[in-house]
C-alpha cells in the first residue's frame, strides 16, 4: 500500500535536521539568522517571517529592532543592514504589545489580525540575542509545527550563546580582540561589492537622525582610552577599576547605535567600528560618547574622562593598518590635553601626523 508524502505543514525530522546543519556550519550571526528565516518560511501557508530583537539595558529604555525579514517566494532573506530605513527604525516596546507579552512570559502565543494568523515565538538570550520570532501565515500553524519550531529556536539560542562565550569579553560583554579582524572584514570588505550600487541607499536606521545615510556607507574606526586609568586602579583597587570598565561598556551600548560594533581590546582600551556619511558625523558620534562619560558619576571613583582617536576605513585597508591610524590619533589626544576626540584625517591635514599607509608588511609613503 502506497504512503502519501508528508505535508509541508508537518515536516519530517529531516527538515529540522537540515536547518540545524545549515545554522551550525557558520559562525557568522547574519548567516545563522538567514538560515533560520529561510527554513521557517518554507512551511506551507507561511507568508512572512520577521526576526525581532530587543536592544537596550534591562534597567533602561528598551526597543524593538527588526533584524531579519523573509517573505514567501522571495530569496534570500533580507537581514541586518540590507533592510530599508523604514523597516529598521527602533520601535518602543509598547508598539508591539503582543510581542512583549510573548517575550516576558516566555511562551508561544498566537494572534489573529484579519485574515493573518501570527505565531509569536520567544527567543531567550542576553542583550545581543533576546527577541521574538514572528511567523505570519494564511491559516493557523499546527501544534506539531509550533512545538518543532520552538525546539529549533532553543537550539538556535544555545548556539548563539556559545558564540557569545567565545567572541565576547567576559567582563563587559563587548566583542573581544580576537573577533576584530573577522568582523572588520565582514563589515567593510563583504559590503564593498555594494559600495557603488544605486540600490544601496539603505541607511543605518537609528534614533540619531543625523547619522542616516542617503548614499554608499562609509566606515570609521575609533579607539577609546580611559584617561589616567592606571591611577584609578592604583588608588581604588582593581575591583573598582573593573566596575568602571563595566559601566563604560554600558555607556557605549546606550550611546552608540545598536548596529555599531563595540569591542574591548583589553585593559582600558576600547574600539568602535561604525558607519557614518562623513567625518563630521563620525566625530559627532564619538563626541556624544565622550560627553556621556564626562557627565557620568562613577560610583567609588567620581568623574572620569576618555580620549578618542578615529580614522576612516579605506579601500584595501587591513584591520591593523586602520587601527594603527586611529591609535596614533588617540595617542596625540592623550599627549595634548586628554578628554578629547581627535580625527586622524584632520591631524594629517594640519601637519600634526604623517599618513603612512601599510598593506601587510609593505609601508607606503
Image: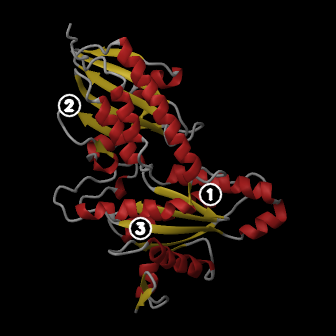
Tell me if residue 156 comes above or below residue 261 in the rendering.
Answer: above
Closest to the camera, between mark 1 and mark 2, is 2
Q: Secondary structure at mark 1?
A: helix
**Is the C-beta separation of discs 1 and 2 under 8 Å?**
no
Closest to the camera, between mark 2 and mark 3, is 2
Tell me if residue 264 comes above or below residue 119 in the rendering.
Answer: below
- Residue tagged 2: 72
Mark 2, residues whose alpha carbon is within 10 Å: few (<14), some, or many (≥20)? some
Of the residues under marks 2 and 3, which one precedes in the sequence?
A: 2
Q: CA distance from mark 2 to mark 3?
A: 36 Å
Residue 35 lies, in percent from the top left, at 34, 39
- Residue tagged 3: 220
- Residue tagged 1: 295
Of the residues under marks 1 and 2, which one precedes in the sequence?
A: 2
Judge whether residue 66 can be spotted in this image.
no
**Is the C-beta separation of discs 2 and 3 under 8 Å?**
no
Q: In terms of depth relative to the viewer, which is nearer, 192 or 165?
A: 165
Identify the residue at horizontal 26%, vertical 36% (top origin).
70
Q: CA distance from mark 1 to mark 2?
A: 49 Å
Work out which quarter of the rendered image holds the C terminus and state it. bottom left
Residue 43 lies, in percent from the top left, at 26, 24
Amino acid at each position: 500500500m502506497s504512503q502519501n508524502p508528508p505535508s509541508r505543514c508537518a515536516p519530517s525530522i529531516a527538515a529540522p535536521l537540515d536547518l540545524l546543519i545549515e545554522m551550525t556550519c557558520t559562525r557568522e550571526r547574519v548567516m545563522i539568522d538567514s538560515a533560520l528565516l529561510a527554513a521557517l518560511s518554507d512551511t506551507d501557508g507561511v507568508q512572512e517571517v520577521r526576526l525581532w530583537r530587543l536592544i537596550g539595558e534591562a534597567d533602561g529604555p528598551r526597543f524593538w529592532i527588526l533584524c531579519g525579514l523573509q517573505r514567501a517566494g522571495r530569496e534570500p532573506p533580507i537581514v541586518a543592514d540590507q533592510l530599508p530605513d523604514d523597516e529598521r527604525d527602533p520601535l518602543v516596546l509598547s508598539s508591539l504589545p503582543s510581542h512583549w507579552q510573548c517575550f516576558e512570559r516566555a511562551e508561544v502565543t498566537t494572534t489573529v489580525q484579519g485574515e493573518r494568523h501570527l505565531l509569536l515565538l520567544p527567543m531567550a538570550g542576553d542583550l545581543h540575542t533576546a527577541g521574538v520570532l514572528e511567523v505570519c501565515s494564511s491559516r493557523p500553524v499546527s501544534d506539531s509545527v509550533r512545538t518543532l519550531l520552538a525546539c529549533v529556536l532553543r537550539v538556535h539560542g544555545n548556539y548563539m550563546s556559545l558564540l557569545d562565550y567565545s567572541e565576547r569579553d567576559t567582563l563587559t560583554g563587548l566583542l573581544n580582540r580576537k573577533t576584530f579582524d573577522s568582523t572588520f572584514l565582514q563589515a567593510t570588505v563583504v559590503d564593498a561589492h555594494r559600495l557603488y550600487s544605486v540600490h544601496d541607499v539603505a541607511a543605518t536606521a537609528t534614533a540619531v537622525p543625523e547619522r542616516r545615510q542617503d548614499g554608499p556607507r562609509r566606515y570609521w574606526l575609533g579607539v577609546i582610552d580611559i584617561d589616567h586609568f592606571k591611577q584609578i586602579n592604583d588608588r581604588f583597587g582593581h575591583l573598582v577599576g573593573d566596575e568602571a570598565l563595566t559601566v563604560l561598556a554600558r555607556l557605549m551600548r546606550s550611546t552608540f547605535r545598536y548596529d555599531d560594533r563595540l569591542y574591548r581590546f583589553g585593559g582600558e582600551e576600547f574600539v568602535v567600528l561604525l558607519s557614518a556619511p562623513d567625518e563630521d558625523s563620525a566625530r559627532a558620534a564619538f563626541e556624544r560618547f565622550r560627553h556621556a562619560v564626562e557627565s557620568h558619576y562613577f560610583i567609588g571613583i567620581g568623574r572620569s574622562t576618555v580620549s578618542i582617536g578615529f580614522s576612516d576605513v579605506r579601500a584595501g585597508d587591513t584591520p591593523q593598518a586602520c587601527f594603527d591610524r586611529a591609535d596614533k590619533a588617540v595617542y596625540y589626544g592623550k599627549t595634548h590635553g586628554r578628554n578629547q576626540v581627535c580625527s586622524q584625517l584632520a591631524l594629517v591635514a594640519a601637519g600634526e601626523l604623517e599618513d603612512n599607509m601599510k598593506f601587510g608588511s609593505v609601508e607606503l609613503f
